[in-house]
Image: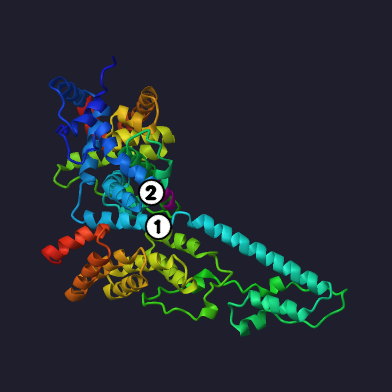
Amino acid sequence: MSQVEPTDLLCRSRREELSADEQRRLNEALQHSLEVRLMSEVLSALESDSRVRPRDEALLARITANALGKPQELPRRRHTFSMLLVAAAVLLVAGLAGAVLGGAQPARAVQALQNFFSDLPREEVAKRVRPRSVQPKTKPMPSNAVQAAPEPVAVQEMVSEIPSAEPVPPPPAAVSQPKAGTAFRSASELFARANLRRRQGHGAEATSLYQLLLEQYPNAREVAPSRLALAKYFQAKQPAQALAQFRQVASAGGALRAEALWGISETATHLGDAAVAEQALADLLREFPESPYAEVARARTTHGLP
Amino acid sequence: MLRALPHPNAPPPPGPKAEDELLPLARAAIDGNEVALRTLLTTVAPNILRVVRRVIGGSHPDVEDVAQECAVEFVSALRRFRGESSIRHFAARVALRSAMNARRRQRAAKRNHGASDLMDSEQAVSDDAPPDALAASRASVQLARELCDSLPSAQAEALALHCVLGYTMSEVASICGAPLETVRSRLRSAKTALVARALADPRLRDLVEEMA
């Protein structure tokens, strides 16, 4: 039977008592083996670095709540949906071209195209889709698909300044669709980019991207987590704006309401508004008694706010 | 000073008891029981957080984000759990891989932006240690993390599990689903590389001379 490796003894020594012989062997290895000594230094330092910290409870609660609230199959479904849209658009344009070239009624064809862009204001559609008089069959049909493509909008123009965290009013239904031609093809892509920039330490740019998402995709499912991210970004330095974002998320309900209520409580406490903080905790406990936040909330309501 | 005392943050020992504790919960979670999934995640979340702190550093500003990623990855990976290791070990491995990927991504991004590497310049040991011990500990940690970034993935994973997370070789073998001798061989190569780097690192000269 092979002898136990000294580094194994080192690992075991950090969680159980070694026998006298094992301890003697480990001590010898620590004195004579650079490998064991290095590993001992690393493990000691990392144990200190990964110790439990005062705010870990809330941190773990957030991690758990977010992990459970995150849609797992979202990217695949969105990809499929966008492919279907592209296929539908191609079929529509091909059908229209065939109809016009074949001498079918152009007014109905244009009407169909207008219906396709029915989410845009009528004036905008009229600009993009100009009904053409019937031409001889020999004249080629101009591509409506090309004409209908909106002008590309540079992302830099849209995020040129750091926007405030004021709640974004819902836009009219007619313009609820995102502007096409931007660098981001979907809310999830924009959200991923914003998250990446935030993690890379570019908070201001990330904030702009989240705001852009709120403006362009007001009905997307990424809206609530974007608001939460904005709220957390503003929490330390602009608590009033953070509170507004938390309230928007809370009022929308859904899986993130518990976290938003927790955020309201934290931010209101920071602002010195104990009544709002206590109300948020009470709502949290009443509506989400099973939430990971609830345990911390109970402690707060029992022992008082910090 | 020799630091070989047991520590409360050390990983839980393996064994049938640990497996039995969480397996029914995991099975219920896999079957779609949301309460079981929540309870399971609440139970393993501290382990995930500990792994993340050890891999990227406890004071790193992205600890929460990376731990979040790891938790999501754990929930997603749970469907692939076949019971070959304990749930805690499974969670540790998933978290380790996610955290190491996040660390590599961030290092690459920082290199592209020409910024200094914050992940390894941070405080990794308590301030009450003597200055020379502090420097040696920091350098050792940095060395181990950098080595994990550069080694082939199987060796890096074994080294991180053993040297960063403190699992014994048999535990590493169980976690990776690899034969013990394979793990031993991977670790032998990795630890040789660690020693070679330490010998070449001026910050560890005192430690090396002390051992000579």
Helix, strand or loop for disc 1: loop
Q: How many marks?
A: 2
Q: Quadrant of the N terminus of chain B?
A: top left
Q: Where is residue B31 shown, x and y percent of the image?
A: 40, 46
Q: Is residue A196 visible?
A: yes
Q: Mark 1: few, some, or many residues within 10 Å (few <14, many ≥20)?
A: some
Q: Which residue is mark 1?
A: A70
* Percent x, y of residue A92: 70, 68
Which residue is depicted at the point 19% across and 34% down?
A15
Is mark 2 in CB contact (under 8 Å) with mark 1?
Answer: yes
Residue A115 picture location, percent across and down: 65, 77
The spot of residue A224 in percent (x, y) is 39, 67
The type of residue carrying mark 2 is Val
In terms of image quadrants, where is residue A153?
bottom right
Point out the stretch of residues depicted in magenta: B103-109
Judging from the image, mark 1 belongs to the subunit labelled A
- Residue toward you, A136 or A195: A136
Q: Residue at x 49, y 65 (%)?
A: A187
CA gap between label 2 and label 1 equals 10 Å
What is the chain identity of the residue bearing mark 2? B
Q: In screen coordinates, is A187 left or right of A123?
A: left
Label 2 environment density (alpha carbons within 10 Å; few <14, some 14–19, many ≥20): many
Relative to A88, residue B125 above or below = above
Specify the label residue B75 is tagged with. Answer: 2
